[in-house]
Image (cartoon, rainbow, N blue to C red):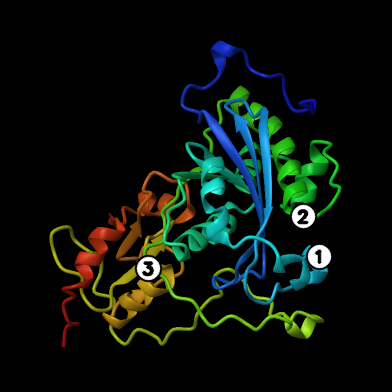
Amino acid sequence: MLEDRTTAPPSATAWPTAYPQGYAVVDVETTGLARDDRIISAAVYRLDARGEVQDHWYTLVNPQRDPGPVWIHGLTSDVLGGAPLFPDVAEEFAARLDGRVLVAHNAVFDWQMIAREYARAKREAPVRQRLCTIALSKELGLPLPNHKLESLAAHFGVVQQRAHHALDDARVLAEAFRPSLLAAAAGGVRLPLHECRPLTEWSDRPAPRIGQQAGYGGYRQTSWRPSRKRPACPYPNPGRYEEGKCLKQGMRVAFSGDTSVERDLLEDRATEAGLHVATSLSRLTSLLVTNDPDSGTSKVVKARQYGTPVVDEAAFGQLLADVEPADG
């Protein structure tokens, strides 16, 4: 058992009642980092309310496409060729996640990869909340040189054996998460929990053919949501949205958190309606769209500070149906 080197565990009576009753520490390896990439291996460590390991599970997944950066994850087409497809492991994976908070390092990436795989399989992952250990380490003020998993592991004396192997990465994170959780409980820290929403509408690009992974030339490094250059909004900003009224062309709209409709599709629809899609929130923002208004994201915090109106995704969809033309 890993010794907690940060603080003594709180007593049973002092444990925060608002904390979750169980966690699923997850790591997925993928063919790449873009939205249309696929999961090729997954691991889950189930933990109880105090972060003690209950069991663990691991599987390879056949992505039916090029496996991507083999030099990073070591999983070739030959290795993955006999692995189960994601729909074949979806039920077991869901059983490991059910009723628990998903914990991951850069959790938005792991969750959105998982959500997309379940959407492709015409199923829904039983995850309602996620916790990012990067965000938790910031809340705790851990003196880390950076936010890599290896730095978090080193801080708590956890030894990595096989970096970029889903099972070992999940083990390392589980061992580092327990002392982080104990420190948060002892300090009365609010856990940075975020709502998870399944995808109901999304788009994929054609996948590269199997066999294109050899060498760096066969793998296009991308980010999860590369910034898209949209044409400048041709309309002046008419000001803030007022409850009960229509949106007007030129209004600045920002988005935060998970959406059931893929973010790019939602932003495209806003742009087509004549709205200005803002990547950040300022005093000039007309409206913030979020399904998780109690989260601590920077946009939500700034919206509270500036008094920016907030609506959820469903309400925004209704407002998009009747956007007033710009003046003049």
Res 156 quadrant in image: top right
Of pointers 3 and 2, the one earlier in the residue sequence: 2
Q: Which residue is mark 3?
A: 201
Label placed on residue 165? 2
Of pointers 1 and 3, the one earlier in the residue sequence: 1
Three-letter amino acid code at the position of disc 3: Glu
Counting from the top left corner in percent of width and height, residue 184 is at: 61, 30
Label 3, secondary structure: give it. Answer: loop
Of pointers 2 and 1, the one earlier in the residue sequence: 1
Res 289 quadrant in image: bottom left
Q: CA distance from mark 1 to mark 3?
A: 32 Å
The C terminus lies in quadrant: bottom left
Front tag of 1 and 3: 1
Counting from the top left corner in percent of width and height, residue 171 is at: 74, 42
Q: Does residue 157 sit above or below 317 in this rendering?
A: above
Task: Name the residue at 81% across, 65% down.
Answer: 74
Q: Which residue is mark 1?
A: 74
